Image: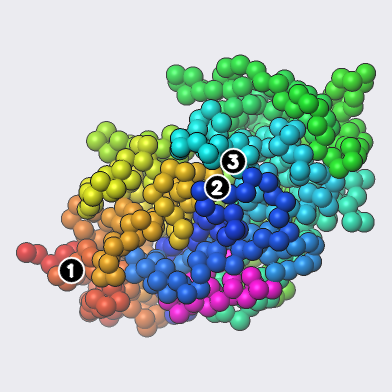
Amino acid sequence: MFDIDGPRFVDAQGRHAILRGVNLGGDTKVPLSHAGLNPPRDFSDHRDVSFIGRPFPLEEADEHLGRIRRWGFNVLRLLTTWEAVEHAGPGQYDEAYLDYLTAVCAKAAEHELAVFIDFHQDVWSRMSGGDGAPGWVFEAVGLNLEAFDAADAVHVMQQRYDYASPERRQEDRYPMMSWPRNYQMPVNGIMWTAFFAGAALTPDWRAGGRNVQDLLQETYLGAVRAVAERLRDLPNVLGFDSLNEPSLGWVGQPLSRRRTGPDADCAMPVWPGPSWTPLDGLKVARGLSASVPIMARGEGREMQVAGESLVNPDGVSIWLENAADPFEAAGAWSVVDGEAMARDEDFFRVKDGRVLDHERDFMAPFFARVAATIRSVRPDWLLFGEMCPYLMLQGKTFPRPMPERTVNASHWYDIEILGTKLYDPDQDHGGDRQRYEFQLGFIRAMGLSMRDGGAPTLIGEFGIPYDLNHGQAFERWADGERGAGVWRAHSQALGVMYDAMDGLLLSSTQWNYSAGNRNDLRIGDGWNQEDLSIFSRDQTTTADDPASGARALEGFSRPYVQRGQGVITAMTFEGGADTLTAMIDVDPGIDAATEIFAPHWRYPDGVCVATSGVEAEWSHDSLRQVVVVKALAAGRLKIVVSPVAD
């Protein structure tokens, strides 16, 4: 359905295409049996779970996909997880789930939705506070997942949150947006370091007869290939994401020196809560206690020490059968008379006298392996490349050379909105668009510099929490209030984001559409109290209501040029007047017309189209919600779409 030409997406006729889509969906991170108000506390069933029904039951596919298409989206970033594919054990693929996933993609094709597959993860796995890898992986590398909570080695909602309490937000037990702190904790430090740098840092750490890095990457890529083989014949599947938001692990960090935030050596942020060094994590994993500082934001939002916490006071080891620590065996540290001693402060920073560069040394070969895996199944597939998003704080970009036919699929959020879940639509947000364009412009430049001739950028994730301002919109809806005013804050925030992306002509997939979402501070998207879904079952009304199920429809369902008869050079939307202005450098060799999405709910009485610069003809297909403009000569074509005047 779409290909790439230098820095642009193009369709089969060669038209410059803007891909505007949504992630499907947030609740796909969790097996169906673990949904609900009180999910299982432990993970003893991790080999027997099923993800069939994620993102939705097949009998609901037409409802959800039809709604997504009517709202103006043309692409899906479709989530799956390594666990969903291979939860039973290494090489044991869930064939019934693969049948289901293939059927979802085929249904998307019926609704003219392109798809690229995202093997999703957050903080490695459900068992370490997020989603992604199956539970047997821990056992394969020698970790005892049953000991994680007792050793304070992870921060997991199911084990920290009191589900018996009526209190929705439990800031003392499971603080809002606290799941990322797992990146600093022992389990994530061990797994991510092993996944990317096991061969370099712990060459003698063997698992299944192989170095631990080879075991992890080869089994992950085996799961990717299993999905690829099922989808190879579907024309709407564009390719695969490399891996969602990969972490650096401990690579680049000093062993025992404490940080108060990102620095020149390590881009990983220090989150509110316990602040770990790699040595702290290794001690706790080994069964020693550690005293770690508690960080909090000061009045100026800077991180500062607010106290200390003793972790793992009971001395629980997370290594199976108290096995030896492979990092200790490799010379990073040792225990002398019961005390942990750093033996090589630069163990995770320097190898053989050379400073390690995570992207150059570890991500570049990983990108190549993912590309080779998917293209061994279908050579024309695109690779949607992602690196650790925090590296952008250091101004870093993708390693070169990247594999051919790679898309820059980096993520971007307004961290202030995401972290505080606060937004006042009556305050002055005049500087937001300029700030957004600066940040997104840097990401776009990452794609342009990815290789000679540039590569397209598709913002793989962006979005806002819908439980903004303590869930005020939920309360207003529950009280019977209807209309756009309920979601004014959300629409305003989203609109500025789309304005910035229009200005930069960026493609994007918003985070997210969760079919199981509810207007409940405990449930949300069904994962760690996140609530960024543009859809909620609580919002559904009638079949003829374009806003049925939508949160902040005004913010995301808006006109844009889907396909240009040549190269799209500019695009702006004035929300107050519902007016889209676009500029197209017409290519006379392209016989197909420009197509502009024009949502019927914005233009119930039709559209007025003005063209200039080049002679052109236009028509309006209200059923498809598309304005078609055919230029009759080469040159720069200006198109203005507005509502029919009263």
The residue depicted at 73 percent of the width and 68 percent of the height is: 93
Tell me where residue 123 appears, x and y as whole percent.
64, 45
- Real-space Cα separation, disc 1 to disc 3, in angstroms: 46 Å
Tell me where residue 404 appears, x and y as whole percent.
64, 65
- Mark 1 or mark 2, whichever is nearer to me: 2
Whether the residues at callouts 1 and 2 have beta carbons within 8 Å, the answer is no
- Between 437 and 259, the residue placed more toward the observer is 259
Tell me where residue 445 appears, x and y as whole percent.
51, 50
Asked if residue 639 can be seen in this view, the reply is no
**Quarter holding residue 276:** top right
Looking at the image, residue 262 sits to the left or right of residue 515; the answer is right
Going from N to C along the chain, the mark reached first, 1 or 3, is: 3
The residue depicted at 59 percent of the width and 40 percent of the height is: 157
- Mark 1 or mark 3, whichever is nearer to me: 3
- Mark 3 or mark 2, whichever is nearer to me: 2
The residue depicted at 75 percent of the width and 33 percent of the height is: 151
Residue matched to label 2: 38
Residue matched to label 3: 157
Looking at the image, residue 65 sits to the left or right of residue 384; the answer is left
Looking at the image, residue 620 sits to the left or right of residue 212; the answer is left
* Magenta-colored span: 95-117
